Image (cartoon, helix red, strand yellow):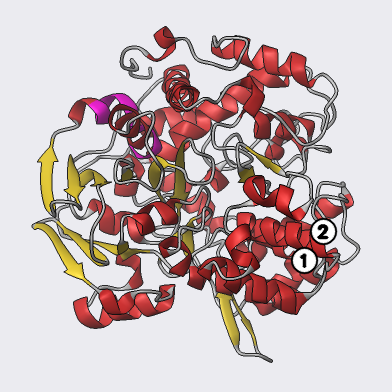
């Protein structure tokens, strides 16, 4: 099996020391990225750790595909105990960081302990340095990147930064990279902020050799030649379609379609796009540098999930207003989905949908924990009682778009996801709209036959997050190509994925999570039976817990024929 290379660099913030150790056995068994981060976190983070405490550990890892010249590979993974879900969680980000990370020569980097002073940690192939930066307290993303570029001649593509939200332990704070790209879900920015780290830089000239099969060039060529609508509109191209099929959350989930969808549609985003945007090595170029000429506002995006959270779910029908919310979340370092949904919950409590001034004011208050923002910074699961609104979250994580009341299999996938209400954990919505060919498509309604497919999709996405491969490669990298690219049997790859899902679940079980946490704020016909079938497919107990034997031993992998 082709896998990531390099040692583990462990950085102790308490002692300001660094150690290096071989993790060849972990890399060989778990490919790279998310699976490697999960295995290390499972073994090294205490089950009873405080997500904001020094005992929590944050892992960064890339995969073998970051050594390719193939499209869809400009991503990397981060893993830690989440302040939002209180469980083990991985998040990944696009941009240009991953190649600079591999240039350090490390297969993974571990951040432990906590610093007494606000610091930037510089990780290079010739060592690690700690820089005290008290003057950067409260600095926003672009200011941090400007400082690092001026003082260290490193562009934003070398950095992971924490905005004011991370410093203030907003539970859905993001890690930002390349200025506008985010390790968005789960609050990993607050983990780094709690460790008193303002930024991490990665640089070097020691990229390990990993040989990727020549089929990578076929993928790259097809991505370059594709005339996919996402090249023009990114994921915002989904907005009007989702509204038409009643899958677009509106006014804090009280409705399923939005009469103002045209004003926040992909067409409106495309009108504001002023140049192409992409991630490292990717010819698909689906990113969205946008500019509003009237106000001078520039941002990247908004993507569909942001359009939902700060648009339809907040009762806003002007794309420029959504762009402003998107920009401020990037600068302050917050997940646009969780932040937008939490703002929408507040609007519901105030009967203030569509109040753009209040929305923008509230975003600032959340990041700085001022006024009502201190309550909202805890997220919907922790503040909904105070607001006297329904709890629209799973395992503490706020919902994205692709509403499960219409896309029922995606609803089941929201419930089973160890990460909480996250659409990319199983990416089941793609089968039900559908966004795939007719042979793969499933009916939106009902749950019959879907639990086994949810399991397969969850397992497959572990491998994509470990390789690391963008989910939007789905039209270009099928099972056969994945086997060839990783020199491994597809079923064996799914087995590794299943072991990683079980590790996540078992870790969370030790923190008190079980079937009661696999729930939805709405009813689906046959849901309990489908949940039983899901557990049976995985070999788990009826109460949603994992038998110890299900995670024993290392995953075995065989070479594909």
Determine if the magenta segment contains residue 30. yes
In the image, residue 47 above or below residue 214: above
Determine if the magenta segment contains residue 399. no
Q: Quadrant of residue 435?
A: top right
In the image, residue 508 above or below residue 182: above
80 left or right of 180 in image? left
The percent position of residue 197, horizontal first and vertical second, equals 30, 61
Bin the neighbour count of mark 1 within 10 Å (Cα to Cα): few under 14, some 14-19, many 20 and up: many
The percent position of residue 397, horizontal first and vertical second, equals 61, 44
N-term mark: 1 or 2: 2
Residue plotted at (34% across, 59% down): 97
Q: Are marks 1 and 2 in contact (CB under 8 Å)?
A: yes
Residue identified by numbered label 2: 240
Q: Quadrant of residue 19?
A: top left
Residue identified by numbered label 1: 265
The span picked out in magenta is: 26-36
The alpha-carbon separation of the residues under discs 1 and 2 comes to 6 Å
Residue plotted at (61% across, 13% down): 543
């Amino acid at each position: 099996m082709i896998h990531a290379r390099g040692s583990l660099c462990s950085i102790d913030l308490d002692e300001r020391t660094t150690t290096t150790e071989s993790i060849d056995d972990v890399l060989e068994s778990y490919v790279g990225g998310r699976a490697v981060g999960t295995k290390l976190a499972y073994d090294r983070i205490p089950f009873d750790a405080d997500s904001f405490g020094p005992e929590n550990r944050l892992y960064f890892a890339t995969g073998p595909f970051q050594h390719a010249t193939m499209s869809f590979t400009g991503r990397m993974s981060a893993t830690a105990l989440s302040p939002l879900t209180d469980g083990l969680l991985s998040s990944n980000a696009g941009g240009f960081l991953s190649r600079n990370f591999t240039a350090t020569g490390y297969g993974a980097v571990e951040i432990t302990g906590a610093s007494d002073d606000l610091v930037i940690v510089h990780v290079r192939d010739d060592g690690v340095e700690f820089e005290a930066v008290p003057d950067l307290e409260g600095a926003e993303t672009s200011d941090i990147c400007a400082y690092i570029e001026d003082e260290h001649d490193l562009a934003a593509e070398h950095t992971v930064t924490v905005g004011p939200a991370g410093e203030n332990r907003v539970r859905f704070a993001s890690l930002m990279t390349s200025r506008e790209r985010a390790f968005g879900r789960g609050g990993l920015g607050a983990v780094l902020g709690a460790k008193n780290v303002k930024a991490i830089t990665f640089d070097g000239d020691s990229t390990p050799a990993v040989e990727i099969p020549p089929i990578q060039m076929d993928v790259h060529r097809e991505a370059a030649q594709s005339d996919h609508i996402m090249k023009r509109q990114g994921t915002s191209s989904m907005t009007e379609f989702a509204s038409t099929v009643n899958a677009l959350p509106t006014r804090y989930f009280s409705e399923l379609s939005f009469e103002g969808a045209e004003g926040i549609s992909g067409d409106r985003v495309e009108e504001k796009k002023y140049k192409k945007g992409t991630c490292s090595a990717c010819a698909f170029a689906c990113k969205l540098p946008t500019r509003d000429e009237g106000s001078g506002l520039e941002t990247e995006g908004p993507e569909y999930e942001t359009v939902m959270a700060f648009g339809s779910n907040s009762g806003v029908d002007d794309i420029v207003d959504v762009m402003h919310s998107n920009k401020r979340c990037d600068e302050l370092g917050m997940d646009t989905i969780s932040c937008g949904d939490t703002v929408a919950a507040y609007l519901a409590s105030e009967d203030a949908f569509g109040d753009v001034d209040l929305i923008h004011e509230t975003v600032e208050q959340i990041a700085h924990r001022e006024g009502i923002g201190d309550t909202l910074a805890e997220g919907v699961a922790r503040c909904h009682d105070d607001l006297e609104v329904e709890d629209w979250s799973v395992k503490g994580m706020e919902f994205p778009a692709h509403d499960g009341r219409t896309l029922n299999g995606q609803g089941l996938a929201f419930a089973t996801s160890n990460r909480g209400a996250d659409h990319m954990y199983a990416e089941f919505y793609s089968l039900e709209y559908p966004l795939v060919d007719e042979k793969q498509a499933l009916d939106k309604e009902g749950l019959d036959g879907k639990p086994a497919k949810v399991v397969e999709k969850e397992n497959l996405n572990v491998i994509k997050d470990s390789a690391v491969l963008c989910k939007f490669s789905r039209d270009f990298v099928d099972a056969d190509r994945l086997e060839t690219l990783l020199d491994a049997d597809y079923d064996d790859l799914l087995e590794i994925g299943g072991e990683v899902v079980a590790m996540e679940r078992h870790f969370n079980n030790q923190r008190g999570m079980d079937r009661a946490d696999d729930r939805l704020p709405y009813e689906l016909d046959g849901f309990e039976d489908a949940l039983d079938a899901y557990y049976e497919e995985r070999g788990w107990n009826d109460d949603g817990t994992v038998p110890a034997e299900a995670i024993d031993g290392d995953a075995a992998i065989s070479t594909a024929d």
